[in-house]
Image: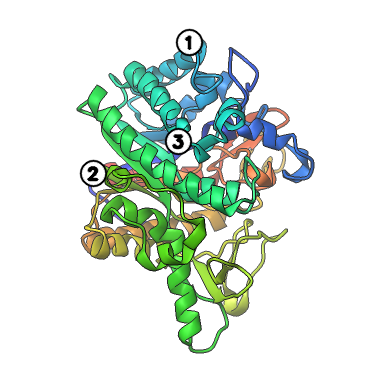
Amino acid sequence: MTYPVFPREFVFGAATASYQIEGAVAEAGRGESIWDAFCRKPGVIKNGETGDVACDHYHRYREDLQIMRDLGLPAYRFSLAWPRVIPDGEGAINRPGLDFYSRLVDELLTEGIRPFVTLFHWDLPLALQRRYGGFADRRCIDAYLRYVETVVTTLGDRVKDWITFNEPWVYAVLGHLLGVHAPGLRRPRIAFRVAHHQLVAHGRAVECVRGIRPDARIGITLNLAPVHPEAGAAAPGRRAERAVRRADQSLNGLFLDPLFRGHYPEAFWRRLSILRPPVRPGDMETAATPIDFLGVNNYTRHRARWSLRNPPFFFAMDGTDPPEREFTGPEGTEFTAMGWEVYPDGLYEVLTRLRTEYGNPPVFITENGAAFSDELSDRGGTDAPCVDDPRRVAYLDAYIRSAHRALREGCDLRGYFVWTLLDNFEWAEGYSKRFGIVYVDYPTQRRVVKASGRWYAGLINASRA
């Protein structure tokens, strides 16, 4: 198989998130997170599953490091569990929790693997949610900054690459508007406060990290996707075009515009009306604090249609309710197990837009991957179990070639992280969806590298060569 050729300095890696893999939720002083509490609510997680054990990475991280080394991963993106470091969010530091991450970083560096650390990947300490309503209250920003200061002071001599927030849109909208993620609220006014306060917290964290470690590189990760008219529609009319524009502002512009232009999309801000979050003097300047790179998570595209039943947006987007099975749409369109359309050109469209409309910032693709129905095979009884996942190989190959195309045309693309290293707890989907390039047999915690993992190792090796 031939691979696209990337520059030698291009960074390849794999990404994970703390609540999705660590387990050990009640060990070594870790406090509860909003996801611990959310998983206990009846009916919100498929099959009533939780992240209590997940991949047991807390105890098995050395085994997972060996897999990373065998795959030849140059970099590893992971998140810290805030409640493992500061159990109640703003009180005493939990030294065993901080020591766990310190050991992880040390061993990554010993293996020659560059750590990229995400400071917040949705697992807010439950105490802060109960005390302040989480990021709905500005006091949570101060608690977050103390947490940032704690971990950067401890790890910043070894970790140089930091991400302030992962997908703040998902945390705000799915967690506080649609209620399908923790903390499970459906309160529009609160959702937009949470979005705004994350932007302010991000800007202040950038300043905090640089104040402690001037040599640090720091950015933020956004979920970005092109928005197109609904599938099967005739030539789009004015309403369809307006729906696409409004959906794009709500999904992409809500964070891109404050970060790179210092203001919210004007038309979107007007439509918010009484739902606008309170913006204090200096907030937007803080949100627009220059960053060293932008993280981009992309999996699919969205389609928008006009809808008067969905204020204040007046549009609806396809793909918000994953089907129960994989399926093929009209004209052979392929979908993943999440119900997301396989659309590799979408990654090219996102990267090209960042180049032409937002000043061509340095970009790392911090997540890209696909869930499919993987099965463990024993190869007819041999001692070499395997997982053949040709659809994932084809997906990754197509998306990486799309990224390569954008790089050739001048996008300042610095790296690519596959989502994800290990099959894991997939939020509201529990363990029913497998994204990993490494198969996890949850009853035994056995790890088996999939064919896609071997393919990815080949890509990395070819780029090094």
Whether residue 388 can be seen here: no
In the image, which disc is placed on residue 290? 2
Element under disc 2: loop
Find residue 71 and report its horizontal and vertical position in percent: 43, 35
Instruction: Tell me which corner region of the image, top left, top right, bottom left or bottom right, holds residue 25.
Output: top right
Left or right of 233? Residue 108 is: left
Sequence-wise first label, 3 or 1: 1
In the image, which disc is placed on residue 138? 3
Residue drawn at 34 percent across, 58 percent down = 403
Q: CA distance from mark 1 to mark 2?
A: 32 Å
Residue position for label 1: 95
Element under disc 1: helix
Q: CA distance from mark 3 to mark 1?
A: 26 Å
The three-letter amino acid code for the residue at tag 1 is: Arg
Whether residue 127 can be seen here: yes
Placement of the N terminus among the 4 image quadrants:
bottom left
Q: Are marks 3 and 2 in contact (CB under 8 Å)?
A: no
Instruction: Tell me which corner region of the image, top left, top right, bottom left or bottom right, holds residue 406.
Output: bottom left
The three-letter amino acid code for the residue at tag 3 is: Arg
Sequence-wise first label, 1 or 2: 1
